[in-house]
Image (cartoon, rainbow, N blue to C red):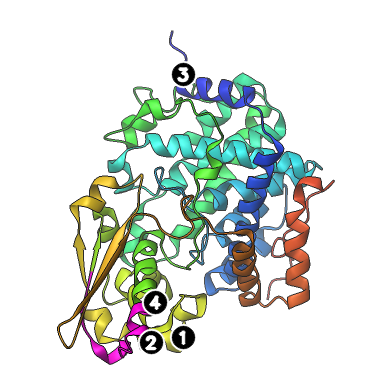
Amino acid sequence: MSVSLTRQLVQELKDRLITSDDLDIATYYTLDFLGSYMGGGITSQGQKLREYSRLIGDCGPEPGAFLAAALSHITETDDLHRSSVTHPACVVIPVALELARHLDLTGKIALESVVVGYETMIRIGDSLGSEHYKVFHNTATAGVFGAASAAAYLLELNENQWVWALGNAGTQASGLWQFNTDASMSKHLHAGHAAQAGIKAALLAMRDFTGPEFILEGDKGFYKGFCPNPSPEKVTERKSVWRIAETSIKPYPSCRHTHPAIDVALALREKLLKEDVGISNGIKSIKIFTYDTSRRFTDHNAPETTFAAKFSIQYCVVTALLNGFPQLPDFEGDRLEETRNHPLVKSAQVVVDDVFDAKYPSEWGSAVEITLNDGSIFRDETFAAKGDPEKPVTMDELKSKVLGNFAYAGLAEDASTELFELFKELKFAEEIPTLHWNTPSRNLK
């Protein structure tokens, strides 16, 4: 009988060395997660989730991981791995922090589990195929495997138990894109459920609760049910380094598919300002060239809500042109009302470019072409967005982003700096700090 994909993966994960440099990389993504998590907690969706958390209480690590995962996937500031089209941090890191805290483990061990969880989620996400992503949300469906592996590592499961954990995680996988049609709140549940299901699968496996060995490639398994064009070989593909470092950081609070075009719009804004062009009334038309997946997910010229605006490439490009670097308040309140009704948002065209489409998903690129009222044309393009490994966000830039999210959440400057520095030294910590929003009270208001 052949060796299952999950068993081959587990064998490699258990044999791989995690270095101090790998822990530093995991710290970088953990700090980014922290900003997304705190920012999500202050939103209207976040408050509903926190009310739910207070209702169910804090019995074991699952409720805390669910809440942290769901909150960190609200503001659209969490990280993104391109080829797997997953957001690993919002699923894996809550599992690592919450379960390690409940097990009284050190920060170093928690960060090691982050590396392992990212690896699993990325590899399985890579294997799902392009057709899967058209209906299913990879962060949810690949996320359960990443969560289960992170938990399995912390629980020191043996090989069989780890395989069972992945099997029972896979059978719980879920997450459909239908929520995007009406900009509903289901997306946040996807991350929360994936984290919670992964912990559950691992805790049961620790007790020898068995799971399907061939959950991915079996005749009634994951690929057969969810993936018309899978690439199973991606699960066991050998790499010389851990893949966590391939993950991109999002500088802007919007869908990552909009980011290449935002980068270009910001560059064009600088050129237009140097030419003394009135951006609001001097532009006749805008064309945005991108890959087909980006068009399918972000071609919305009439966004009505904060969430819809973050998934509108027209809104994001026009925001960048008018206001510069997009920030969380640009998608809310009066700014949302003003920008979503701007004529340029309504008229901007989104066009699939064969060159960008051919390079996706290994490269996410876009071009923006602006025609002025006098007929002159400004155009620029990119094949990598700010925050991609080719254009990394520095630690100073990351700190500025995270502290900005803390301020958005209402934290005082001194408390924000203290929290950032506390988690920056996580690999030396003897215990895991409690996350701010994860202190449920049973006194519901």
What is the three-letter code of the residue carrying label 1? Gly
Relative to 301, 186 lies left or right: right
Instruction: Inspect this view and state whether residue 22 appears.
Output: yes
Residues drawn in magenta: 269-287
Q: Nearer the viewer, residue 280 or 32?
A: 280
Q: Is 345 inside the magenta-drawn segment?
A: no
What is the three-letter code of the residue carrying label 3? Ser
**Label 1, label 3: how far apart the Cα atoms are:** 51 Å
State the residue position of label 4: 320
Q: Nearer the viewer, residue 205 or 257?
A: 257
State the residue position of label 2: 337
Frontmost of labels 4 and 1 is 4
| Quarter holding residue 368 | bottom left
Relative to 40, 212 lies left or right: left
| Quarter holding residue 237 | top left
Q: Residues within 10 Å of mark 1 (few under 14, many from 20)?
A: few
Q: Secondary structure at mark 3?
A: loop
Q: Nearer the viewer, residue 363 or 342?
A: 363
State the residue position of label 1: 333
**Label 1, label 2: how far apart the Cα atoms are:** 6 Å
- Image marks 1 and 2: residues in contact by CB distance under 8 Å: yes
State the residue position of label 3: 4
Q: Secondary structure at mark 2?
A: helix
